[in-house]
Image: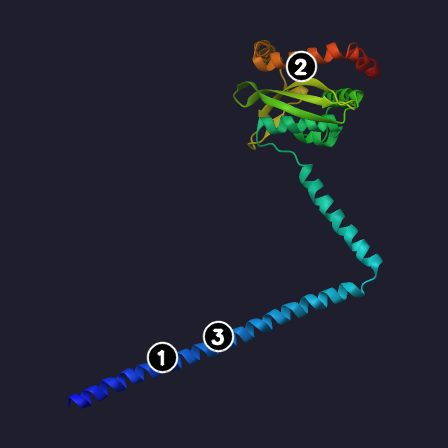
Amino acid sequence: MDREKAATNVRKRSGASGAHAKAAAAKKRQQARHKNTAKGRSSRRTSGRADIAAVFARLPKKVLAAAAVLIVLIIVIVFAARGCGVSHKTPEKVVRTLVEAYTSGSESKAKKCYGVSKADDNLQQEMDATVNYYKAFAADKAEITQCGQIYQNGKITYMYVIYDLVLKNGQSYPCISTYMVQKKDDGKYYVMTPSEITDDISKQAATKYAEFMNTQVYKDYTTAYDKFIKKNPGYEEQIAAKLK
């Protein structure tokens, strides 16, 4: 009986070993199939790339050059379209955009900052005068250094922006501008046009600006401005002469 039990135990162990062997063999066959499949996919991809390369190789050089130019133009147009937008999310962003529009001479972009498609006489005069003023400097670019609030009253925010006009001789002419910005019903911020600014708003702005002149921000601006004028005597007169 013990021998039968021993024999039975041996057969069970032998049977288990046989099952493991069969499973291992099946696993190897499956791995081989996967390997062959992967090779097939890789070869198809390689073949596809080779076919595409062959097509390009058969194309005339003029066609390839034209295609390359077209791709470059598309990229330029896409980035230009992204860069010409106007952000109305905050008072700071719309004011910054307006300064950039004026210094670059983009009247259409300035109108978007004001939220108008056609400017009335007062706004048109202001835009023309501002654009001509910046043209007189013949600056290469404008660099905004600071932008912030002077005061806020309800949906109206009085903003200042300090920036440098980078001249062709490498010097920077310090500038400061102020704008009234209003939050409209659509939740967006727009620079107020001259016709939207009432006498009461103007009086309050004058009082707040007088207080702003005592801040360190304004004092730093005047220091930089005085330094430029001292280094370039008669410069303002030159600009005024160009505007006549």
Residue drawn at point x = 78 percent, y = 64 percent: 57
| Neighbourhood count class around disc 3 (C-alpha, 10 Å): few under 14, some 14–19, many 20 upward | few
Image quarter in which the N terminus is found: bottom left
The mark lying in front, picked from 3 and 2, is: 3
Residue under pointer 2: 224
| Left or right of 163, for residue 243 | right
Work out how far the residue at label 1 is from the one at label 2, CA to CA, in angstroms: 86 Å
Q: Which residue is mark 1?
A: 20
Amino acid type shown at disc 2 = Ala
Residue type at tag 3: Gln
Q: Secondary structure at mark 2?
A: helix
Q: Earlier in the sequence, mark 3 or mark 1?
A: 1
- Closer to the N terminus: mark 3 or mark 2? 3
Q: Nearer the viewer, mark 1 or mark 2?
A: 1
Visual colour scheme:
rainbow
Q: Quadrant of the C terminus?
A: top right
Please name whichever residue, 202 or 216, is drawn nearer the observer in this view of the structure. 216
Q: Secondary structure at mark 1?
A: helix
Q: Which residue is mark 3?
A: 31
Residue in view at x 78 percent, y 10 percent:
233
Residue 176 rendering spot, x and y as whole percentages: 66, 17
Distance Cα–Cα, label 3 vs label 2: 75 Å
Counting from the top left corner in percent of width and height, residue 75 is at 71, 47
Answer few, some or many: residues within 10 Å of disc 1's Cα (few below 14, many 20 plus, some between 14 and 19). Answer: few
State which tag comes first along the sequence, 1 or 2.
1
